[in-house]
Amino acid sequence: MTTSPPPWEAWAPPLNPPASGGLPIDQAQAIAQAWWDQDPHLCAALQWESYAATLPMTPTVSQVATGAQSVSYSPALPGGDYGLAVARARWHRSFTTAVSVPLEASRPPQRR
C-alpha cells in the first residue's frame, strides 16, 4: 500500500530527504502543522523563506543584457537559487490573507 504525500509538499521547496541541501523535512513539517490549515500560501511562503535562509546569498541583478535585448529590474533582485527561493516566497505571500486591525473612529470628547 502506498501512501500519498501530504498536500503541502506540492508547494514546498526541495526537501531533505530526498534532495540533499533541501529544507530539512522536520522543519517543513513543523511549519505545515502550524500554518497549512489556516493559510496554505503563508505556509508555503514560510517554507520557501526558511529554505532561502539555508542558501548562500547571491549578488543582486538590476540589468541583464544579451546581444539582442536588455532587461532592467527595479528593484534589483537576487539571482541564483537564493533569488528563486525568495521570489517563490514573495509570490506565495501575495496570496496570503491580509491581517489587519479594524480602525475605529474615536468619539469626540463629551462636554460637561
Image (tube, rainbow, N blue to C red):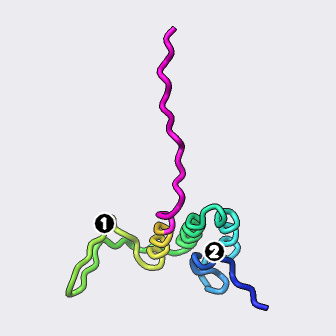
Residue 96 image point, x, y percent:
53, 61
Query: Within the magenta stretch, is there residue 97?
Result: yes
Q: Which mark is residue 16?
A: none
**In the foreground, 49 or 43:** 43
The three-letter amino acid code for the residue at tag 1 is Ser
Q: Residue at x 51, y 68 (%)?
A: 92
Q: Is residue 47 left or right of residue 64?
A: right
Q: Which residues are magenta?
A: 92-112
Q: Quadrant of the N terminus?
A: bottom right
- In percent of width and height, residue 26 lies at 70, 73
Mark 1 against mark 2, which lies toward the viewer?
2
Give the residue drawn at x 39%, y 73%: 59
Q: How many marks?
A: 2
Task: Based on the picture, tell me whether residue 86 belongs to the magenta stretch.
Answer: no
* Position of residue 36 measured from the top left corner of the image (x, y, whole percent): 64, 66
Taking depth in this image into account, of 42 and 59 the one nearest to the observer is: 42
Residue of label 2: 8
Say whether residue 70 is left or right of residue 1: left
- Mark 2 lies on a secondary structure that is helix
Residue 51 lies in quadrant: bottom right
Q: Which residue is mark 1?
A: 74
Decide: few, some or many residues near mark 2? Use Cα within 10 Å; few <14, some 14-19, many ≥20.
some
Examine the residues drawn in magenta and state their main secondary structure.
loop
Residue displayed at 54% across by 58% down: 97
Classify 10 Å Cα crowding around label 1: few (below 14), some (14-19), many (20 and above): few
Q: What amino acid is labelled 2 in the image?
A: Trp
Q: Secondary structure at mark 1?
A: strand
